[in-house]
Image: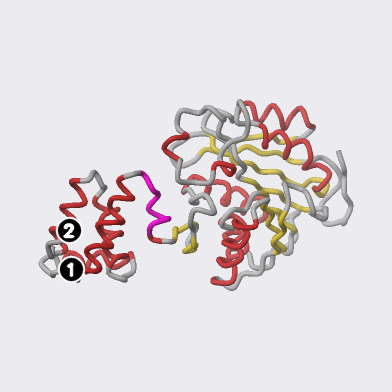
């Protein structure tokens, strides 16, 4: 293998179809440098790469060109100001999901929500939502559930890395969970089994992506069961697909939720929908089951 300069290595990556930023981040990773050191590449464009780093960069570039997520290749992803460990055991946290976190924080800031509100994150994956909420509002009592022990291992490692106390439970949705909660939040699988976009997501865990013929299978289960685990006046907030907002709102209304509404992501697409479970004021310790 020929010894290349940084500039030559980046040019070679671009011939494979890599975006400039992806190539830069992969090269920094191969060199053992943080992703924030992009300026270093600009000032060292004629620096020769060590042979081992050059080989590693080539391997990473080929994997990226084959569609493997950048986050898996570098081992981390930034989400809501937190650097999270991610690998093939969990989905890569998406920027769109920050819309769900921001909405949850708005509801938790309401006057009728106690500082130590109990929050449940269903299908936590890497722990992104649960950890973002706990980081922003440390007094929260946060529980995070996932059916995958592998995913929970990743989430727990992220919690330890950031020294955030979250209660992790292995179970299928509400299994093994003790009610009630002031707020339940979830980014469940919502891709239809035959969705044409699935091949592009082949490197990520399929069980965390698909949910039946119409993609609404898990959303239906959560909406149906959630009232038994919510405080009266508690909120259920859900992420869903770009074309599922109306269907999810209808499911919430049919189940008896009030103040049903949707929130758009940065692209203006309705990305999350939720509603409030009716009943007496929060903070009484009472629970209204459906």
Query: Element under label 2?
Result: helix
Q: Position of residue 174 (x, y in %)?
A: 76, 48
Q: Residue at x 47, y 64 (%)?
A: 83
Q: Residue at x 81, y 48 (%)?
A: 229
Q: Residue at x 78, y 49 (%)?
A: 175
Camera-nearest residue between 135 and 28:
28
Q: Position of residue 159 (x, y in %)?
A: 59, 67
Q: Position of residue 44 (x, y in %)?
A: 15, 69
Range covered by the magenta-colored residues: 67-73
Which labelled disc corresponds to residue 193? none
Camera-nearest residue between 13 and 97:
13
Q: Residue at x 57, y 59 (%)?
A: 132
Asked if labels 2 and 1 touch by Cβ distance under 8 angstroms, the answer is yes
Q: Position of residue 130 (x, y in %)?
A: 62, 58
Identify the image quadrant of the N terminus: bottom left
Picture quadrant of residue 5: bottom left
Residue 71 is covered by the magenta coloring = yes
Residue 280, compared with residue 216, is above or below; it is: below
Disc 1 crowd rating (10 Å Cα; few below 14, some 14-19, many 20+) is many
Q: Earlier in the sequence, mark 1 or mark 2?
A: 2
Left or right of 215 in this view: 11:
left
Residue 146 is covered by the magenta coloring = no
Camera-nearest residue between 15 and 252:
15
The residue indicated by pointer 2 is: 9
Which labelled disc corresponds to residue 49? 1
Disc 1 from disc 2: Cα separation? 8 Å
């Amino acid at each position: 293998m020929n010894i290349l300069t940084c500039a030559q290595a980046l040019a070679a990556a671009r011939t494979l179809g890599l975006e400039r930023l992806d190539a830069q981040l992969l090269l920094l990773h191969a060199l053992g440098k943080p992703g924030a050191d992009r300026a270093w590449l600009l000032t060292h464009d004629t620096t020769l790469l060590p042979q081992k780093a050059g080989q590693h960069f080539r391997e990473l570039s080929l994997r990226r060109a084959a569609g493997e997520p950048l986050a898996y290749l570098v081992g981390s992803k930034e989400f809501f100001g937190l650097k999270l460990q991610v690998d093939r055991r969990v989905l890569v946290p998406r920027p769109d999901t920050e819309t769900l976190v921001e909405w949850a924080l708005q509801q938790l800031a309401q006057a009728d929500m106690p500082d130590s509100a109990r929050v449940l994150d269903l299908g936590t994956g890497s722990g992104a939502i649960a950890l973002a909420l706990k980081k922003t509002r440390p007094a929260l009592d946060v529980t995070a559930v996932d059916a995958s022990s592998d995913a929970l291992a990743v989430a727990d490692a992220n919690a330890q890395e950031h020294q955030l106390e979250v209660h992790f439970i292995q179970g299928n949705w509400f299994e093994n969970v003790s009610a009630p909660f002031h707020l339940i939040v979830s980014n469940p699988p919502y891709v239809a089994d035959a969705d044409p976009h699935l091949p592009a997501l082949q490197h990520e865990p399929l069980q965390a992506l698909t949910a039946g013929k119409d993609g609404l299978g898990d959303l239906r289960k959560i909406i149906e069961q959630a009232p038994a685990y919510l405080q009266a006046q508690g909120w259920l907030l859900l992420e869903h697909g770009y074309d599922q907002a109306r269907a999810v709102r209808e499911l919430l209304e049919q189940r008896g939720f009030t103040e049903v509404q949707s929130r758009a992501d940065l692209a203006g697409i309705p990305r999350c929908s939720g509603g409030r479970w009716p009943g007496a004021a929060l903070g009484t310790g009472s629970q209204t089951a459906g």
